[in-house]
Image (cartoon, rainbow, N blue to C red):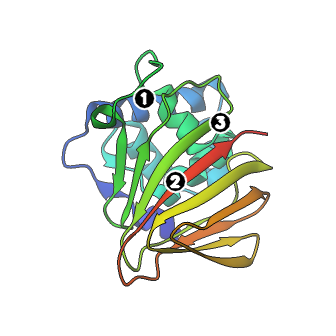
Amino acid sequence: MREAEKLASPAPGPSALETRLAARLAELRVQRGWSLDELARRSEISRSTLSRLERGEISPTAALLGRLCTVYERPMSRLLAEVEAEPPQVVRAGTQAVWRDEQSGFERRSVSPPHPALRGEIVEGILRPGADIAYDAPPVAGLEQHIWVLEGTLEVTVDGHLHEVGAGDCLRFRLWGGSRFRCPGPGPVRYALLVVLP
């Protein structure tokens, strides 16, 4: 069993967003004509875990969802935007979609009004001290990212190169390989992530 799979946890009761996400994951697989076995082969996630994800019995971790986004060739932000209602032009702070991965210590807020047809978006990320999330590959090769740290320190590894980004600093890169986000502490890190599709 892969490490990302181990981090999938039983859902205490799915939210409306989680229910729509589970349905969208199943829909993406069916649209491609893949069986659960085929998706398991492509994603290196067990068939039983995939089945439970699609039925909404467990919530995906950031790493697990990242692996599925890679297989489906879409950024996580776009996948989450696809399960939102009709996208508004303004999203007030109190209604922005927030997704939490309690086990890895990651909180992700969709700041930009969601729209699957747009190429750029802003996401707020918060990692608690010691949080360490690795992605095997980008969801879309050549994805442009800008990371602006608002509070704390973030260690970002891009294609094997480690960057320490402090408060006020901004890192820009195009992603072709693996990436890793780590909060070395002592406090949490809060950052703005700007994502631009190639």
At label 2, which amino acid type do we have? Ala
Residue most extreme to the front: 168
Please report whichever mark, 2 or 3, sits nearer to the chain's N-terminal start: 3
Measured from the top left, where is residue 37 in percent x and y? 59, 45
Q: Nearer the viewer, mark 1 or mark 2?
A: 2
Q: Which residue is mark 2?
A: 192
Please report whichever mark, 1 or 2, sits nearer to the chain's N-terminal start: 1
At label 1, which amino acid type do we have? Ala
Q: Is residue 67 above or below residue 87?
A: below
At label 3, which amino acid type do we have? Gly
Q: Residues within 10 Å of mark 1 (few under 14, many from 20)?
A: some
Q: Which residue is mark 3?
A: 120
The kind of secondary structure element at disc 3 is strand
Measured from the top left, where is residue 157 in percent x and y? 66, 73
Q: Which residue is mark 1?
A: 23
The one nearer the camera, 9 or 48, is 9
Q: Residues within 10 Å of mark 3 (few under 14, many from 20)?
A: some
- The quadrant of the rendering that contains the C terminus is top right
